[in-house]
Image: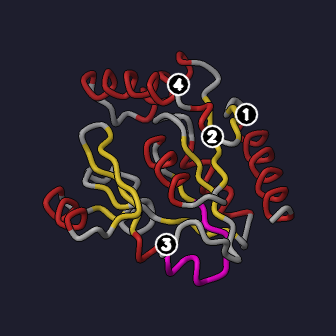
Amino acid sequence: MSGNKKSASRLFVISGPSGVGKGTVVQELLRLRADLVISVSYTSRRPRADEVDGVNYYFIDRPDFEARIARDEFLEYAQVHRNYYGTSRAKVQELLASGKNVLFEVDVQGGVNLKKKFADLRSIFVLPPSEEELVKRMQTRGSETPETMGIRLATMRQELALADNYDYQIMNEDLNACIGALNKIIDAEIKGK
């Protein structure tokens, strides 16, 4: 697959630090837009209580993930918070063939790597209103131990430093305003292709 070829589909990546609300924003966008499909990533981490295999992620174990890396099955992959996350080359090819616009919800490393593969991909970074609010959101989620919270906070600071590598930055202080801004970006990019 040539990543730099123009296709009928537009490609969008949404990234941001853990706890910023990417998943909520993406689910709402998918509900509102019939022209948008999500590329479901693979991960080696265990599912959270509310996550469904094949919907939120494809959950596989670490040896399976590493075997897929060895077979070059991922367009991009990264190790984040001690777990692997990756985008399946075959699944993206299927989505592009559908003619719909493809949305990637990936970590910052994945977003930067996808941008290198697809010259016409538009990248959107979701910012938290503040570090304190992000910490509060992660604590409310209830899935973090003190150790994983410390890892996520350190990663968050590194990720925020890379936000300028994205085409757009949107703050998720108010969910409806954030979704409205994302919709405007997607509409403008689709009309501009």
Q: Secondary structure at mark 2?
A: loop
For the residue marked with disc 3, what is the amino acid?
A: Val
> The residue tagged with tag 3: helix, strand or loop?
helix
Q: CA distance from mark 4 to mark 3?
A: 28 Å
In the rendered structure, the answer to whether residue 159 lies left or right of residue 151 reads right
Residue at horizontal 72 percent and vertical 72 percent from the top: 35
Decide whether residue 167 is among the magenta residues. no
Position in image of residue 130 (x %, y %): 60, 19
Give the spatial CA distance, label 2 vs label 3. Answer: 21 Å
- In front: label 1 or label 2: 2
Looking at the image, residue 157 sits to the left or right of residue 32; the answer is left
Q: Amino acid at mark 1?
A: Asp
Quadrant of the rendering where the C terminus is positioned: bottom right
Earlier residue among tags 2 and 3:
3
* Disc sitting over residue 174 in the figure: 1
Nearest the eye: 86 or 135:
86
What residue is shown at x 37% (from left), y 28% (from top)?
152
Mark 1–mark 3 distance (CA, rounded to whole Å): 31 Å
- Three-letter code, disc 2: Tyr
Residue 98: say if magenta.
yes
Residue, x 61% and y 71% (percent of image)? 5
Q: Which residue is mark 4?
A: 161
Q: Quadrant of residue 138?
A: top left
Left or right side of 166 for 50: left
Report the residue marked by disc 3. Answer: 92
Q: Is residue 57 above or below residue 35?
A: above
Q: Secondary structure at mark 1?
A: loop
Name the residue beneath numbered marker 2.
166
User: What amino acid type should be assigned to the residue bearing mark 4?
Assistant: Ala
- Magenta stretch in the rendered image: 93-103
- Within-10-Å neighbours for mark 4: few <14, some 14–19, many 20+: few
